[in-house]
Amino acid sequence: MSLSVKKIQPKDKEELLNILRRMGVGSANQSELVAEGWQECLLIKNVPKDVSTTVSTQINVSGGKIVVSSDSGDVPTGRENLLLMCSTAPLRHLVDVLREHPSSQAKELAEKILALIDKASEQWVWKFGNRRFDLRNRVLIMGILNVTPDSFSDGGKYFAKDRALRRAEEMVNEGADIIDVGGESSRPGAQPVSVQEELRRVVPVIRAIKERLDIPVSIDTYKYEVAGEAIAAGAEIVNDITGLRHSARMKTLIAEHGVGVVIMHMQGTPQTMQVAPHYDDVVEEIGAFLEHQLSEAKQAGVEEECIVVDPGIGFGKLLEHNLEILANLGRLRARCQRPLLIGVSRKSFIGQLLGGIPPDERLAGGLGAVLSAVMNGANIVRVHDVSPTRQALTIYESIAQFNRKG
Ligand code: HH2
């Protein structure tokens, strides 16, 4: 009977409880085990008892949790099944200890765990063209540049090319990592514009930015004709609010050019999405959608490393849906295994929570939402207000880094 190591991601606490029951964990110990850190576990089967003892000691010392099962029916005599709930650092230490263990099976287990850790670390990398972002310890800021007359908070402000370019330069100086150029508003009730009009708005701006600034530009469009021309003008990312559903040819376009892509969830269309959004389980449904679109994109030839996902705050969602999503980003992150982009900037849920204040007064509330999103698992934040967001993130990251050291 050979050793096996598998990462498991229970979809919710109920599923984890079932796994624990199957492993013979009594109900008294179950609640403590599911209290936290349950989104990602390592299931190791058929571990010889001496190796199992070493694993248990190491995991307990490091403050992780471990369940040992030897009598749940599928475990051969002299062997044990283990369920580990801990972060990567103690696992790496465990690998070092197992490599020094006299048993060859301990060494085999060390290499299997290491292979899993290495594979898991790839999910933090966003890579396209000659760009590579490791998002484990760093949050990216995507600065919004709406070249539209009617966007909900900055419509008309950057409609002229020179003004748009100046704003892009300003955002780069303020600490933006990406500039997201959009030529069609997606606010609730917004009317679509033609491909020609959208091209007329975005292409000269993208060209002008690429001539002057070395920053990745993303094109916020769901039309493959617009994406194609934007890529030709220098865009390196396609940000598709329909999650690659609108244009059948979008996936192949992205695959052919090897550009980055944001797959976003939206229920309905901007014209209808806020009429009566409904979900039975909003986090589950969005997770299933993103997972499905991810796999469709990969089948069409898009490299997994090029993809990030976005639950689409405010797109066919009521206040309570937005809050539930933001509170459960860890679940989405664990399910999709890709970096998470979140757009909360000046959105209406902030106004709703703060007595109906207008978009241009939502900065402080928005920073609260950004920090909460980052603490819950967001890796890229899409914002209008780059400078205050960079300041807030600098403080957050300085503290978080200290926590990692400690
Ligand atoms: N939100 C908006 C537009 N594009 N793209 C992603 N990936 N995620 C978002 O949350 C998102 C997005 C809406 O905001 P904004 O661009 O400011 O407004 P408008 O659509 O009115 O131009």
Image: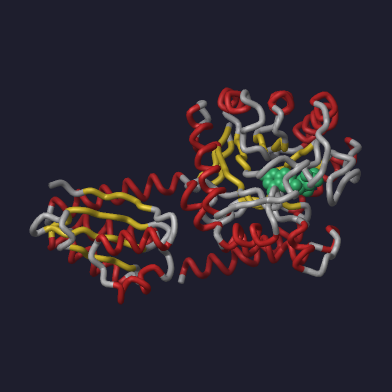
Position above or below: 229 against 402: above
From the top left corner, tell me how far across and down residue 133 is, in percent.
Answer: 56, 45
Count how many numbered circles sit on residues in the image.
0
Would you say 260 lies left or right of 178 here? left
For the point 72% across and 23% down, the residue is: 225
Would you say 301 lies left or right of 371 here? left
From the top left corner, tell me how far across and down residue 28 is, in percent.
Answer: 30, 76
For the point 68% across and 63% down, the residue is: 369
For the point 30% across and 73% down, the residue is: 27
For the point 75% across and 49% down, the residue is: 275
Position above or below: 377 against 245: below
From the top left corner, tell me how far across and down residue 176 is, in percent.
Answer: 71, 49
From the viewer's side, name the closer residue of 11 and 310.
11
Q: Quadrant of residue 308?
A: top right
Q: Is residue 372 visible?
A: yes
The scheme the figure's colours follow is secondary structure
From the viewer's side, name the closer residue of 114 and 33.
33
Position above or below: 240 against 323: above
From the top left corner, tell me how far across and down residue 145 is, in percent.
Answer: 79, 43
From the viewer's side, name the closer residue of 152 and 210.
152
